[in-house]
Amino acid sequence: MVIAKRMEPLVAGSSVIRKLFEEGKELAKEVGAENVYDYSLGNPSVPAPDAVKASIIKILENEDPLYVHGYMSNSGYEEVRQAVADNLNERFGSEYKLDDIIMTVGAASGINDILDIFLDYGDEVIAFAPFFGEYRNYVITAGGILKAVPADTKTFQINIDALDEVITEKTKLIIVNNPNNPTGVIYSGETLDKLQAALEKAEARIGHPLYVISDEPYRELVYDDNVLPFMPDHIRNCLIVYSFSKSLSLPGERIGYIAISPKMDYYEEVKAGLVVTNRVGSVNAPSLMQLVIKECLNERPQIKIYDQNRKMLYEKLTSLGFECLRPQGAFYLFVKSPIDDYEAFVNEGKKQHILMVDASSFGCPGYVRLAYCVSPEMIQRSFPAFERLAETCRALKG
Ligand code: PLP
């Protein structure tokens, strides 16, 4: 092997979700696409708002192409960063300034920029199970070690009680994803206050500050009268990572930002560092898309469509006896395997042409994730297959 040792497992074990997605394509060739119920991938099923297309056209027709397609300050166009800061301040009463915003190549690159500036080799990053499986790959690539706090399977809130023993002197960062992929749970303000208290206690023990990455690609996807807490109101050392992949259905365009809380410890040092890692990692975020999102900061996803899917799937599966978490946000349904052998459950699903992601890859074996960012017709068509799956599970339980 010529590649770095730490990268070998990543290369060998390609993404479970991507693998399942590819399997779905093969299955579709065999049995017809309409007979495959693919709940694997979190790819938005609602098109980008019309305002996105209108602003692309307006920018291309009216702006100087040397400006639109040129290099700019590595952190992004100043007018865009100022607009993002103003928008956050209007919405959340925060006090971000232009320099606190760094435009990134989606949330993934925002997280990687932060890992790169904080981690020395062997440093540790904590995530709360269940968590987005790619975190593990991001952390290893940055030379760190990902440590998981086991899930609190009663509430699926952050398991604060189990946090302290996972924090060591090597811990630098904690990742919190709210609303959560894969559970659809929203961590409450009360939970986040407890988290801050636990971090302060641990900081006194280990002798250095801990920083929280607040990974928020699903911020705008919140159902019913649930409210998503604004993380910097609860967490002192908070770095928001935002993405327009889900909120504006632009995952392929790769656009997001980091917002650096002015209240954090060593604020100037962190800011200066992130400018460097962002420049090294991606030079700058896509220029046209920066200008587009500036025009679309008040656009919101068509939550009604996801909400209908959410209700339809949740109600059907619970009526069949499956134990599901009622999602409060994002577009995922988290379902408990009705049989002890959860891998067998995923395989029985496949036999019915239902593609579900085994939650072991999210650090929470015994559950599966269904991404309901799919067409309502596919959900309807999948119901007889779920009925057969429920029957099979009943028979297997005996
Ligand atoms: N974080 C979470 C929790 C996600 O679910 C995803 C994508 O699915 C990402 C980060 C990466 O998003 P982006 O497309 O903005 O890089």
Image (cartoon, rainbow, N blue to C red):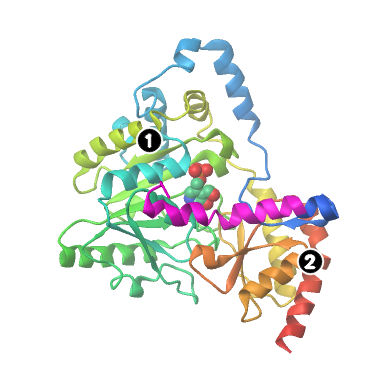
Question: Does 79 sit left or right of 50 as displayed?
Answer: left
- For label 2, the crowd category at 10 Å Cα-Cα, with few meaning under 14, some 14 to 19 and many 20 or more, is some
Q: Quadrant of the C terminus?
A: bottom right
Q: Residue at x 31, y 69 (%)?
A: 166
Q: Which residue is mark 1?
A: 281
In the image, residue 23 sits, relative to residue 58, either above or below, namely: below
Classified by dominant secondary structure, the portion drawn in magenta counts as helix
Can you tell which quarter of the image residue 89 is in? top left
Q: Which residue is mark 2?
A: 352
Residue 342 percent across, percent down from the top left:
62, 75
Can you tell which quarter of the image residue 37 is in? bottom right
Instruction: Identify the element where label 1 is drawn.
Output: helix
Q: Let me know if residue 17 is in the magenta part.
A: yes
Residue 279 appears in the rendering: yes
Q: Residue at x 24, y 66 (%)?
A: 168
Pick out the residue farthest to the front: 1
Viewer-proximal residue among 64 and 231: 64
Q: Residue at x 34, y 59 (%)?
A: 145
Instruction: Identify the element where label 2 is drawn.
Output: loop
In the image, residue 318 sits, relative to residue 89, either above or below, namely: below
Q: Let me know if residue 319 is in the magenta part.
A: no
Report the amino acid beneath label 1.
Gly
In the image, residue 116 sits, relative to residue 87, either above or below, namely: below
Lower position in the chain sequence, tag 2 or tag 1 = 1
Can you tell which quarter of the image residue 269 is in? top left
- For label 1, the crowd category at 10 Å Cα-Cα, with few meaning under 14, some 14 to 19 and many 20 or more, is some
